[in-house]
Image (cartoon, helix red, strand yellow):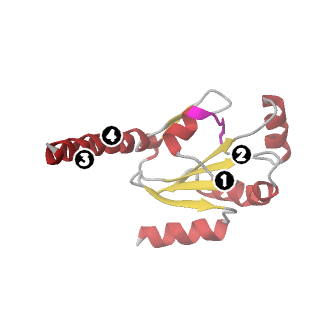
């Protein structure tokens, strides 16, 4: 009986683990302008999902590199999605986005985003997906243009 219950528990946990992977393998996020972004629509491109907050100095520091990456690569091989958490209101976010000249789409973070992408223990945190749509890196802390360029070059080989 013990072996049967253990086997059943393993079977059930593997099915739930598979379901969790299936949910996280393709996300659907809506940005502040109402545009929907689905990971599977960006096949063939690297996708950076960058969690940030308006109160976060390292987040402020990495924005110019993310803008530069997005502006240089968006037509070819890269998509950047910014996800803001822990903000006062939407007008605060809009002002921050305007002040920082953030050209990439911004998503208002909530529980749905966390369920689809994952949690972050620190801000900023960037989830990096390769052109096949596979999560290949979770970068905690500042992400630089050089870091992403090197990752993309190494992944292209």
Q: Residues within 10 Å of mark 1 (few under 14, many from 20)?
A: some
Q: Nearer the viewer, residue 68 or 29?
A: 29
Q: Nearer the viewer, mark 3 or mark 4?
A: 3
| Tag 2 near tag 1, CB within 8 Å | yes
Asked if residue 45 lies in the magenta stretch, the reply is no
Left or right side of 24 for 47: right
- The residue that appears at 34% across and 39% down in the rendered structure is 19
Q: What element carries label 1?
A: helix
- Mark 2 or mark 1: name the one nearer the start of the chain: 1
- Cα distance in 3D space between marks 2 and 1: 7 Å
Q: What element carries label 2?
A: loop
- The residue that appears at 49% across and 39% down in the rendered structure is 116
Magenta span? 105-111
Left or right side of 15 for 136: right
- Cα distance in 3D space between marks 3 and 2: 47 Å
Q: What element carries label 3?
A: helix
Residue corresponding to mark 2: 103
- Mark 3 or mark 4: name the one nearer the start of the chain: 3
Residue corresponding to mark 4: 16
Q: Which of 5 and 152 is in front in this view?
A: 5
Position of the N terminus, as image quadrant, is top left
Asked if residue 106 lies in the magenta stretch, the reply is yes
Residue corresponding to mark 3: 10
């Amino acid at each position: 009986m013990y072996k049967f219950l253990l086997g059943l528990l393993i079977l059930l946990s593997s099915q739930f683990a598979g379901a969790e992977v299936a949910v996280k393998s393709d996300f659907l996020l809506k940005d502040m302008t109402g545009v929907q972004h689905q990971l599977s629509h960006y096949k063939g491109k690297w996708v950076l999902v960058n969690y940030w907050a308006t109160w976060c100095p390292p987040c402020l520091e990495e924005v110019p590199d993310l803008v530069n990456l997005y502006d240089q690569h968006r037509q070819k091989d890269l998509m950047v999605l910014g996800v803001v958490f822990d903000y006062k209101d939407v007008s605060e976010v809009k002002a921050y986005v305007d002040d920082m000249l953030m050209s990439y789409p911004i998503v208002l973070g909530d529980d749905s985003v966390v369920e689809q992408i994952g949690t972050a223990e620190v801000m900023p945190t960037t989830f990096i997906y390769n052109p096949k749509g596979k999560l290949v890196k979770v970068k905690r802390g500042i992400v630089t243009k050089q870091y992403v360029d090197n990752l993309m070059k190494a992944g292209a080989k």
